[in-house]
Amino acid sequence: MASTLPIPDIKVIGPSFIQMDSRNADKPPPTDFNHPYTPYPIQITFMQTLYSVLDRTVAVPLTNTTAPPATFSSTAATLIPSNPSLPTTSPSPPPLFNPTTAPTVHINSATETSPSVTSKTATSKDKDKGPSSSSPKGHAQIALFESPTGTGKSLSLICASLTWLRNHKRLQFESEIKKIKQQMEESGEPGWMVESALKRKREELAQRYEEMERTLERIREREREMEEEGEEGQARGGKRRKLDRGKGDGEEGGKKKGSGGSGGSRGLTASDEDKEFLIEDWKDEGGMDENDPMGQLSKETRELLEKVGMGTAGGKKGGDEEPVAEEGIKIFYTSRTHSQLTQFIQELRRPEFPASVPTPAAQEEPAKEIVKQIPLSSRQKLCINPSVNKLGTLAAINERCQSLQQSKTPKEQRCPYLPNASNLKATHQFRDTALATLPDIEDLYQTGKQLQICPYYASRSAIPGAEVITLPYPLLLQKSAREALGIKLEGNIVIIDEAHNIMDAVSNVHAAEIKYTDLKRAKLSLGMYYQRFQQKLKGENKVMIAQLQRVVEALGVYIKSRLDKAAKGLKEDQEGLVVDPNLLLKTGGADQINLYRLIRYVQESKLAFKIEGYVSYCEEESRDTDDEEAEKEIKKREGRPPVLHTLCSFLTALTNLSSEGKIFYEKIPPPRGEMQDMKLSYMLLSPTHAFSSIAESARAVILAGGTMSPFEDYKAHLFPDVPPEKITTLSCGHVIPKENLCVWTLGSIAPNPKVDTGIGEDCFDFTFSKRSNPNMINRLGLVLLNLCSVVPDGVVAFFPSYGYLEEVIRVWKTPDQAMGPKTIWERLENKKAMFMDSKTESSEQTLQKYSDVIHSEVRPLSPSGTRVKGAMLLSVVGGKMSEGINFSDRLGRCVIVIGLPYPNAHSPEWIARREYLEANFIERYSASQPTTTAPPPAPVIPPPSNTNHSTNPSSRNKDKHKPPNILKLAARASNLFYENATLRAVNQSIGRAIRHQNDYAAIVLIDHRYEREHVRAKLPGWIREGWEETQKQAKEDGKALKGLQGMMGRVNLFFRGKS
C-alpha cells in the first residue's frame, strides 16, 4: 500500500499522529467545550482532537524529546505510544472518555512508519525547538478532519476552537501569576507574603484589561471629537450630498453623467466624449508599493482609513498612535460559498463561551462573553452604491468603485458612502454594531444601508477587535486579496471547511483563459478607441495602447493558426499543450514587450473601463431602437467583465509561469449560428507553492469536510514539507445507528461469474473502453429495476459523465427482444417517476419537481397510466447535484454510483499534470536519499483501477539515467493522485445520502473495481464500516455475499425493517 513508501519528504504515505506535547502529556483535553447540546461521543472525539492540535501550537519546553509520538487507538480512543516496545518516562495518559462508549475513529497508525521516516522525524529541528508562542515561523500544526454531514461538524469546530482560544487567553494570565509565585517561593518568602503579593498581582493584571477599556474609551472620545469637527466642517460647507437611490447609474438631479450602460442615446458632444472616455496622462512611477494594497485610493482616503483603523497590511506609519484594542490570536474560517458561511454564522450564535477577561479572584467563575465575529466579502456582495452594484460583474464593480475614489475625480462624482470626515460617526457605529451582533453578509449590507456607510471598507475597522473572521475561499487563498483586506495569518488559526475541493479551489483562483472571440473583440475595441482619440493621446498612453494592440494581435495570430490546423480534422490539433509560451507572442515582436509594465498600465489607467464604456456608447448611438437582436447582445454583454480585464488576467498568468503551471489550447464548440472558437487556458498543475504562504504563516491550519478520504493527496500536495509529527488526521464514524446503513458493492449479476480473460461475461466493467456494451447497460437497467421494486420513495443514481448518462438512456429506450416487449426505460417509468439532471436545464427546477413527486400525498401516474411509488433521479458524479444538495430522508433512500468517473488520462491537462507529479516525485525523492546509497526496491503497490495511461516518452527519455525502480515509484505516485481524485468525487456523491442521526439509506456501488480492497480503502471510514456490517449480516442470514441475488436479499430485509 501507499503507506509503505519510504519517502519522508513526499508525505504521500507518511503516517499521521494525534499527539500532545510534554506540557499536556499528563492531562487530556477538557471535556466541557461549551457545546449548546449534549454532544455525541463522535463529537467529543472531534473536539478533543482539535483542542489538542491547537494546544500544541503553544511553545513550551519539551522535557522528553526522545519519547515516541502518541496516537489514538482506533478501538479504545486512548492516547498510547506509537511504538509500545519503547519505554516511556511517564505513565500513559488516562482515556479521553469512557472507552465503552467511544465511537470508531479512523486514524492512520503510527506503527506503519518506515524506519527512514522514523529516524528522520525523531531528529527534526522543529521538534527540538517546539513551535513559537507568538507568531510561529516555519510550519503550522496541520489537522485533517473527516466528519460526515449530520454529525455536527460546524458546531464541533466552533466549540473546540473558541474554547481553546478563551482558555488560552486566561491561561496566559494565570501563567504570569504562577511565574511570580515560583520566584517568590524560591527566594524563601513566607507563605502569607506570597499570597498577599499574588493577590495584588492578580488585581494588577486584571486592571490591565480595565486599562485597555479605558484606552479604547479615550480612542472613542477622540473619534467623537473628529466626528464633531467633521460635522462642523460640513455645516460650513453645505449639507452632505446623498445619492438618489431611485435613480440609475450616472444620474443626479436629472443631469446625465454617462455611465457606459445601455438605456438610449445620450448624444454627447465631442467635448463630453473627451471628458468621459479619454484616459488621463499616465506616468510610470515604478508601480505601487506591494505593501500598500490600497494604493489605488486617493491620498485623502488612505489617510482616513488608516486613522479609523482600516489601514493596509503595511501597518501604521506613526509610532505615537494609541493602540486600538486588538484580539491577539484570530480564527479565520473559510468555506466555498456564502450560503455555507451564513450557515456557519448561524451555528456560531448557538453556544456561549466564558469571558477571556480574567476575574480578580481565581475562584470566581468567569462571565459569558459574546463571540466577536466579522464576515468579509467582495464589493459584489457588499456595495450599497446603486450606480455601481448594478454593473453585475465583480471586475466591473471593482473598477467602477476605484474610479470613483480617484483623486482626480470631481468631488461631486465620488462615491458618497466611502468613509470620510463627515461620516466618521457612522463608520464607528458600523464597527461597534458588527462586533456586538454576530452579523452575516446580509446583516452587514443592511447595516451599511441604514448608516449610509460602505460595508466593504467599514468592515475592515472591525478586524482588529474580532476573534473570528469569516470569508470565502478566494479572499483567503489569494495572497493579494489577503493583503488588500489587511489580513495577516501569522500566529493565527485557519479553518478551511468543505475542504474536499480545496486543491481545485486553489487552482481555480489562479486559473485564467482567453478565447479567440475575446481577442477579436479586444482588437476591434482598441481600434475604435485609438482611432477616435489618437490625436489627443499623449506620450505614454499612445505607446502603451500600441503595445497592447500588438499583444492582442500576436495572441490572435497564434490561436488562428491553431484553428486552421484543427479545421483539417487532426485530433491532436483540437487540444494540446503550449510547450513554449514564448511562441504565443512571436508575431510582431510582441515577445519584446514588458508585460509587467503593460499590465500595470491597464490597471492604473483604468483603460479597460474607458474602452468598454466608449464602445458601448458607440453601439447605443448606432443601433436601431427596434433591433431586438442588438438589444439582446448588449444585455448579454452587460453581465460579462470588460474584455481587457480578461486579457490582463491571462497576461498575468503568462508572467507567472513556472513548473507548477502550464498553458493549454482547446477547441470549444460554438453556440448555434456562431463561428468556431478556441481558447487558451492557464492551469495550475500543483497547489503546493500557491498554498505554501498559508501553511508557513499560520499557527494552525485545519482542513475539515464530510468526505475528505483519501487523505494522502492533502499531505503530499498542500503540506509536502511539513514534518509528519505536525500532521493529525481524524476520520469520524457516523452518528446514525449501524442498522440505518446498508452498503453493497455489486461487481456482477452472478455471485461467482465465469472468468473470461479476467472479467466475467456478466461483470460490470465501466471502464471507458467497455462501458458502451449495450448488454451490460441493459443488465444495469435490470439492477435498477430490482432496486426500485424494494426501495421506497427516492432513488438517486450517479453516472460517470453527462455524455454516458445520455448514452445509457438511449440504450434503455431502444427495444430489445431479450428484455421483453417493453423497453427498460418504460419499465423504470412504471416503477418510479423518472428525472434526469442535464447540463442545459436548471438543476433547481429538476430537484423541485423530484421533491414534489416524493412528498406528494397522491401517487403520480406513469406514462402508461399506473401509479408509481416515489421517483428516481439520474445525475452525474461531479455534476450540479453531486455537491451542496441534501437528499435527506425520503429524497434519498438509496444512492447508487455507477462506475468510477476517471478523468480522461490522455487529455493534455492530465498528461501534463502527471508528468509534473512524476518529475517532482523524482526530484524530491532524490534529494531525500544519500548520493552513495542505492534506492530501496520499489514497494508492492496495487496498480490503479484504470491503467490506460501511457506516459509521455519524452519525459521518460530524460530520466533514463535514473534507476528503474524510482521511475516506477514516480509513476505509481501519479497513478495514486489520479485514482484519489476520482474517489474524492465518488465520496462526495455518496455523502448526499445520510444527513442526520435518524436518517437511513442504502448505498450501492456498481462496478467490479469496487470489490477491490485497495479501492474500498479510499472510501470514507463510515462507508467501509457500513460495508463490513452489511457483509456480516448477509453472512449471518445465510445470503450470498456477492451478486444481484445477495444484494436484493440484503436490501429487501433492510427496508422491510424500516417500514
Image (cartoon, rainbow, N blue to C red):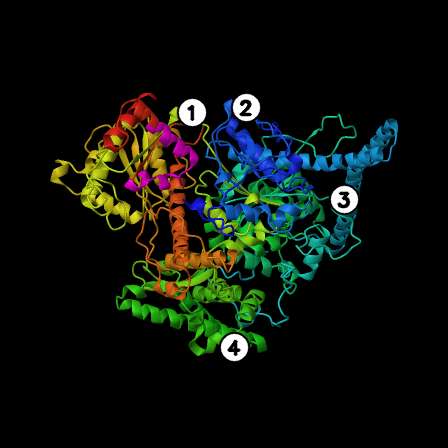
Going by the numbered disc 3, the residue's amino acid type is Arg
Q: Earlier in the sequence, mark 3 or mark 2?
A: 2
Categorize mark 4 by other alpha carbons within 10 Å: few (<14), some (14-19), many (20+): some
Mark 2 and mark 4: Cα distance apart in space: 81 Å
> What's under tag 1, amino acid-wise?
Pro
Residue 177 visible in the current orientation? yes
- Residue on which disc 1 sits: 737
Residue 957, percent from left and from top: 37, 66
- The residue range painted magenta reads 1008-1031
Q: Is residue 741 above or below residue 459?
A: above
Left or right of 973? Residue 594 is: right
Three-letter code for the amino acid on which mark 4 is drawn: Gln
Report if the CB atoms under discs 1 and 3 are less than 8 Å apart. Answer: no
- Residue carrying label 2: 98
Front one among 121 and 598: 121
Going 32% across and 62% down the picture, which residue do you hit? 674
Residue 220, labelled with which disc? 3
- Rendered location of residue 357, percent (x, y): 73, 34
The amino acid sitting under disc 2 is: Asn
Query: Label 2, label 1: how many angstroms apart (C-alpha)?
Result: 19 Å
Mark 1 or 3: in front is 1
Measuring 71% from the left and 46% from the top, which residue is drawn there?
425
Magenta-colored stretch includes residue 403? no
Mark nearest the camera among 4 and 1 is: 1
Q: Mark 1: few, some, or many residues within 10 Å (few <14, many ≥20)?
A: few
Asked if 100 appears above or below 613 in the picture, the reply is above
